[in-house]
Image (tube, rainbow, N blue to C red):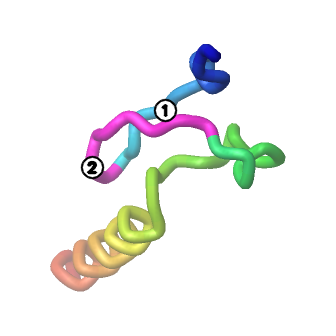
Amino acid sequence: MPHKKVNLPEKICQVCGLAFSWRKKWERNWDEVRYCSERCRRQRQSNSLNHQKDTR
């Protein structure tokens, strides 16, 4: 039996640069998904906070 999930859309994570595939839990907001994981999402937030502190 062939693999069912062959033609899923992919995106590139804005933090780590890795490609990640569509997931069922992202079905409603796939256009808004920018990070491959919670870890990358948190890392992005902490990097932007650190950057704001450095510029002050």
Above or below, 7 relative to 10 = above
Q: Is residue 16 magenta?
A: yes
Residue sitting at x 28%, y 40%: 17
Query: Which element type, helix, strand or loop, lies under badge 2?
Result: loop
The reply, left or right, for residue 7 in relation to residue 53 is: right
Few, some or many C-alpha atoms within 10 Å of disc 1 (few <14, some 14-19, many ≥20)?
A: some
The reply, left or right, for residue 17 in relation to residue 14 is: left
Above or below, 21 relative to 24 = above
The three-letter amino acid code for the residue at tag 1 is Lys
The circle on residue 53 is none
**How much space separates mark 1 and mark 2, taking CA atoms?**
12 Å
The three-letter amino acid code for the residue at tag 2 is Cys
Residue sitting at x 37%, y 46%: 14
| Residue 45 position by quadrant | bottom left
Name the residue tied to disc 1. Answer: 11
Q: Which residues are magenta?
A: 15-22
Residue sitting at x 16%, y 80%: 54
User: Which quadrant: the C terminus?
Assistant: bottom left
Q: Residue 52, how many percent across, how many down?
A: 29, 77
